[in-house]
Image: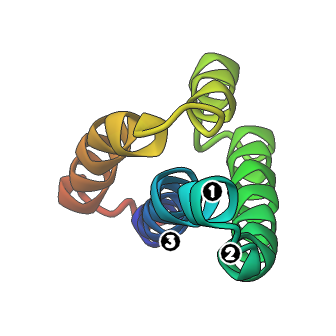
Amino acid sequence: MAKTLGILRWVGFLEGASFLVLLGIAMPLKYAMGMPIGVKVVGPIHGVLFMVYVAMAAHAVSDGWLSKGQGLKMAIASLLPFGPFVVDRELKAMAQRTAEAPVERG
């Protein structure tokens, strides 16, 4: 579980960073300077990362790694600038607790 949360955190970081680049660099270049290349490159990359992030959050909920509330929080956070970075704190704490938990042997 800690490995899955780690991957989810990494994808969240990439998704959040791509959103900030899209909003803070690519879109101003397009609309202020008439240079649409940034949006043409960063837009699809962000789109794929967004879909992967939401799909991984849904998978984590369906497998019981996250509650439905946590999954909803992640989905909403992915729509907001800096949102994935905010929910990352919770995921980091969960991953640390999972990594520190004793392994049950059957």
Q: Using the image as rendered, state which of residue 62 and residue 46 is in the foreground.
A: 46
Name the residue that disc number 2 marks: 35
Q: Amino acid at mark 2?
A: Met
Measuring 72% from the left and 69% from the top, which residue is drawn there? Answer: 39
Q: Nearer the viewer, mark 3 or mark 2?
A: 2
Res 52 quadrant in image: bottom right
Horizontal arrangement in the rendering, residue 61 relative to residue 21 (left or right):
right
Mark 2 secondary-structure assignment: loop
Q: Using the image as rendered, state which of residue 30 and residue 57 is in the foreground.
A: 30
Name the residue that disc number 3 marks: 7
Residue 1 percent location from the top left of the image: 49, 61
Q: Using the image as rendered, state which of residue 78 and residue 20 is in the foreground.
A: 20
Mark 3 secondary-structure assignment: helix
Measuring 63% from the left and 56% from the top, which residue is drawn there? Answer: 27
**Residues packed near mark 1 inside 10 Å, few (<14), some (14 to 19) or many (20 plus):** many
Res 37 quadrant in image: bottom right
Q: Amino acid at mark 1?
A: Met
Instruction: Judge whether 77 appears above or below 47 on screen.
Output: above
Q: Nearer the viewer, mark 1 or mark 3?
A: 1
Q: Using the image as rendered, state which of residue 22 and residue 66 is in the foreground.
A: 22
**Residues packed near mark 3 inside 10 Å, few (<14), some (14 to 19) or many (20 plus):** some
Q: Amino acid at mark 3?
A: Ile
The disc, 3 or 2, on the residue closer to the chain's N-terminal end is 3
Name the residue that disc number 1 marks: 27
The disc, 1 or 3, on the residue closer to the chain's N-terminal end is 3
Horizontal arrangement in the rendering, residue 20 relative to residue 28 (left or right):
left
Residue 28 percent location from the top left of the image: 55, 55
Instruction: Judge whether 69 appears above or below 13 on screen.
Output: above
